Amino acid sequence: MNKIFAKDIKEGLSQFPKQIPSKYFYDERGSSLFSEIMKQPEYYLTNAELEIFQLKSKEIIEQLKVRKDTPFELIELGAGDGYKTIEFLKVLEKEQYQYDYIPIDISQKALDQIKSTVANQLPETTIYPKKGDYFEILHDLKKSSHPKVLFFLGSNIGNMKDELANTFLKRLAENLSKGDQLLLGVDLMKSKSIIYPAYNDSKGITSAFNLNLLERINREFDANFDLLKFKHCPEYDEELGIAKSAIQSMDKQSVEIKALDFIVHFEAGEMVYTEISRKYSNSILDKICSGTEWEIKGKLTDHRGYFADYILEI
């Protein structure tokens, strides 16, 4: 039994409102479903940031002010398959910059995949994959005297509440040195007509992704969630710029989680919140950077202005 998962389930479903951390979406089926979500026409985020890397990598390099005669370390947090970063590395290699690429992820499978991709497409690139906690690895890497450029892409910071995002940026800075930089990918504030469908695609894949969390609990903890009595229920507050994913109980019901000796009671219409996705503006990012050592130095967007990669510096 995954004891941390068990603890988070019991604590989260005992709260009001109920919640389950989004990190538990990604079992094998969940990861596969999310890959499908990213291919849907409504889900603009991935292609918007990919466009920035495909069309503006030279501009990113210029704004980062890295020099060809000064080796630096490119460190990617939560690298995944790294396909957007590969576009950037191609330009670095073509322009003959001196760098080491250090992808960090908790998934060995993802790191093996990116190492293979780099070996095949960019054989001259030096890659040092690292598995584990961001901060522990950054603390170890701080011993190096080389300048560092961090990538934290995909609006992953948007899954954190503002206070947590602020703490996250402070902790990053503590493990870096003066002059180090961060390329931070964020989803920008937009109308509900654009954002809501991104979390509620017409094929129902996002719905299946969200409800798969209940299937996972059924499977791993011998629970009896009836998926026909729950539905995917996304929300978006256009004024605040915060999207939420939730699972709604359609009836008043009780669910037994046998492995945890735990019974959960639901009211009709009650929500279980599974994820937040903060949307950003310049002023919101300024607020989140407040009290940290980070200063915003640049910003690049896709042609529609849907997504931005900000450049921050200590």
Image: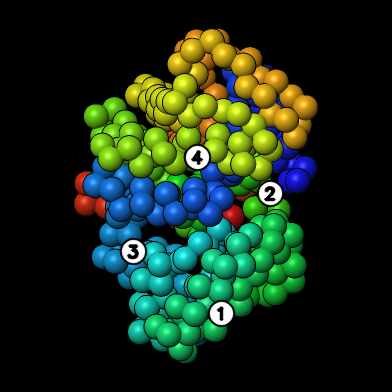
Contact between marks 4 and 3 (CB within 8 A): the answer is no
Instruction: From the top left corner, tell me how far across and down residue 281 is, in percent.
Output: 39, 36
> Tag 3 or tag 1, which sits nearer the N-term?
3
For image coordinates 36% across by 36% down, the residue present is 199
Q: What kind of element bears circle 4?
A: helix
Task: State whether residue 44 is above or below residue 280.
Answer: below
Residue visible at 36% across and 71% down?
87
Quadrant that contains the C terminus: bottom right
Tell me which residue sits at (70%, 69%) in the image: 141
Label 2: state its secondary structure: helix
> Badge 2: few (under 14), some or many (20 or more) residues near its Cα, within 10 Å?
some
Residue 41: % across, % down: 24, 47
Q: Which residue is mark 2?
A: 171
* Amino acid of disc 1: Ile
- Seen in the image, is 236 located left or right of residue 225? left
Which numbered marker is on residue 54? none
Q: Which residue is mark 1?
A: 127
| Whole-number angstrom distance, CA of label 4 to CA of label 1 | 35 Å
The CA span between labels 2 and 3 is 27 Å
Of tags 1 and 2, the one toward the viewer is: 1
How many badges with numbers are in the image?
A: 4
**Closer to the observer: label 2 or label 3?**
3
Q: Is residue 126 above or below residue 250?
A: below
Find disc 3 in the rendering and name its residue. 53
Seen at 31% across and 31% down, the residue is: 196
